[in-house]
Image (cartoon, helix red, strand yellow):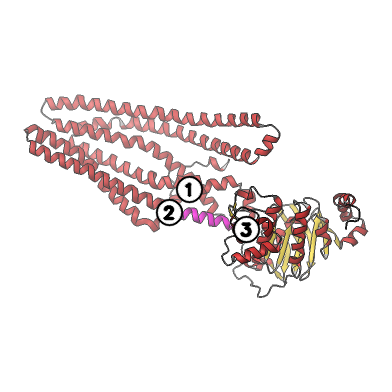
Amino acid sequence: MEEETIFGKAYDGRLVRRLVRYVRPYARGVVAALLLLAGLTLLELAGPVIIKLAIDDAIGRGDFAQLGQYALEYLAVVVGIFFLRYGQNYLLNRAGQLAMHDLRVELFAHMQGLSLAFFDRNPVGRLMTRLTNDVDALNELLTSGGLMILSDAITIVGIAVALLLLNWPLALITFLVIPPLLILTSVVRAGMRSSFRAVRIRLARVNATIAENISGIHVIQLFNRERTTYEHFDAINHDLLRAHLRGVLFFAIFWPLVGVASAVTTGAIIWYGGAQVLQGVLTVGSVVAFLQYVERFFQPIRDLSEKYNIMQQAMASSERIFQILDERPEVRDKSAPVSLARIRGEIEFRNVWFAYEPGNWVLKNVSFHIAEGEKVAVVGATGAGKTSIISMVSRFYDVQRGQILVDGVDVRDIPQVELRRQVGVVLQDPFLFTGTIAHNIRLNEHQITDEQVRQAARYVHADDFIMRLPQGYDTPVRERGAGLSVGEKQLIAFARAVAFNPALLLVLDEATANVDTETEWLIQQALERLMEGRTSIVIAHRLSTIREVDRIIVLHKGQIVEEGTHDDLLQRNGIYARLYELQYRDQEIAAPAGST
């Protein structure tokens, strides 16, 4: 919400210079549009002159042939205006769309390279707004804002010169209305600025409420909150409506007043110009041309107020976009990283301290060693720091103190791409992308063949349920895997890890926590095969998974309090034994007699 209040001046040279970088590759199109704009302005100024000559020269002398010539010239001017306006709009919009395409791609790529800490601070809705609404605001600046302001300014100057050349006393009458209009424009501009800021803040609230309620619709319906949710949304929507209507009020005042100023000026020209005609000082054609110029003089004045808002919105949007582009990843590779020629899989934590927020330590002086090929489980209560260990090994975050070593090399010295290529991760809440089953297994890695995709699925026993789907591996997957069970999504995520064949680690974060017993058994069979010969860190709560590992590390409030095998830890009757009693004893009591 705070970022939506950014609404600075309508022109910021610093931001404009940065925006020019995106337009520069398409400068030819912009220059061509400017040249067409110059020609367009000249043709629009030529129309009233032709009408003046037709009235004073052809009609005044009764020369029908000459009148036809002027009519053809006027038609040629109209046709020329059409083609010039078409060319100018096409070239300008093309350059603007290409520039915004480049900006959007750069912004998306930049965000993909930012550290997870950035996404912890910035909600998805805000980032979506930067990639969509804010980029569209800049596109509007390039296509109908900045250049149109230049066009309006050129038109006003050109008409002012034409009026002075036609008859300077009449021109001065026309110019008398400009000071009051400038004052009116200033007042309306300030009011519209305030209104627009209020609209943006309230629109952000409306969008956030819609997104939140759609995501939580099952909770709303479960607790019969439809009516209260509707009333809450109706209240903030009415707040948005009032903000919009305030802006409409300023527009409703401004446009009629400009119309009144135009009408008053027209009446004054007819009165004074008519008197000049009767006195023989001015021709009828000059008065008609003057009236046409005056009509065209007020149109860009009306437009400038609207274009001002476009400029102001674009500057605010560019400020927000460049804030993201100026963000630097907190986790960065060194200038001379160490490339490990051969990965064995030895992991060591040395006196590791880590906090997501300064002073709020999640891991405190954690030290342990995992030998090559060893399978280690990390257990503990919620908030003990288990998942943070996974994040540290994958180097999603950097430690504040201590070291994490892989094969004796600090992970901060290893390129992130190389390190993560060796890490296979299956999370508790598997994320599936819109696409097909096969796409979700290979994740656009074209080196993974269709046969390898199927082999990976068979390896984790996912092939059976996939082949029962209507289109098998080509079955479309809806957003976040809607329509698939938790177990099925988990098996697909597991097949994904197998397909990428991590050489260094297989890291599992409660991979079997939300599946039924049969699916857990299928996953467990695959786990045993996968972990063989691989260094494995297992974070899980199921008894079967923990019993299969070589060693268990018990975390409590960010510190290692116990370490050993399952049986050893039970005999110590410590924290692990209490966790076991709470989580697993009921399962053993409920097991059928004679089961193992």
Query: In the drawing, what numbered circle is on residue 330?
Result: 3
Looking at the image, tell me whether mark 2 or mark 1 is earlier in sequence order: 2
Q: Which one is in front, 596 or 550? A: 596
Amino acid type, label 2: Ala
Left or right of 284 on screen, residue 331: right
Note whether 583 is above or below 296 in the view shown.
Answer: below
Quadrant of image for the N terminus: top right
Disc 2 element: helix
Mark 2 surroundings within 10 Å by alpha-carbon count, few (fewer than 14), some (14 through 19), many (20 or more): many
Where does the magenta region start and end?
98-115
Residue 218 sits in which quadrant? top right
Query: How far across and down, in percent of the image, does residue 245 sit?
Result: 48, 29
Query: In the drawing, what numbered circle is on residue 135?
Result: 1
Q: Which one is in front, 402 or 300? A: 300
Q: Which one is in front, 9 or 421? A: 421
Left or right of 396 on screen, residue 575: right
Residue 520 sits in which quadrant? bottom right
Query: In the drawing, what numbered circle is on residue 322?
Result: none
Residue 424 sits in which quadrant? bottom right
Residue at 49% of width from left, 34% of height from top?
A: 194
Q: Which residue is mark 2?
A: 99
Looking at the image, tell me whether mark 3 or mark 1 is earlier in sequence order: 1
Q: CA distance from mark 2 to mark 1?
A: 10 Å
Chief SS of the magenta region? helix
Marks 3 and 2: which is nearer the front?
2
Query: How far across and down, in percent of the image, does residue 106 sit?
Result: 50, 56
Q: CA distance from mark 3 to mark 2?
A: 28 Å
Note whether 218 is above or below 323 in the view shown.
Answer: above
How many callouts does the rendering have? 3
Disc 3 element: loop
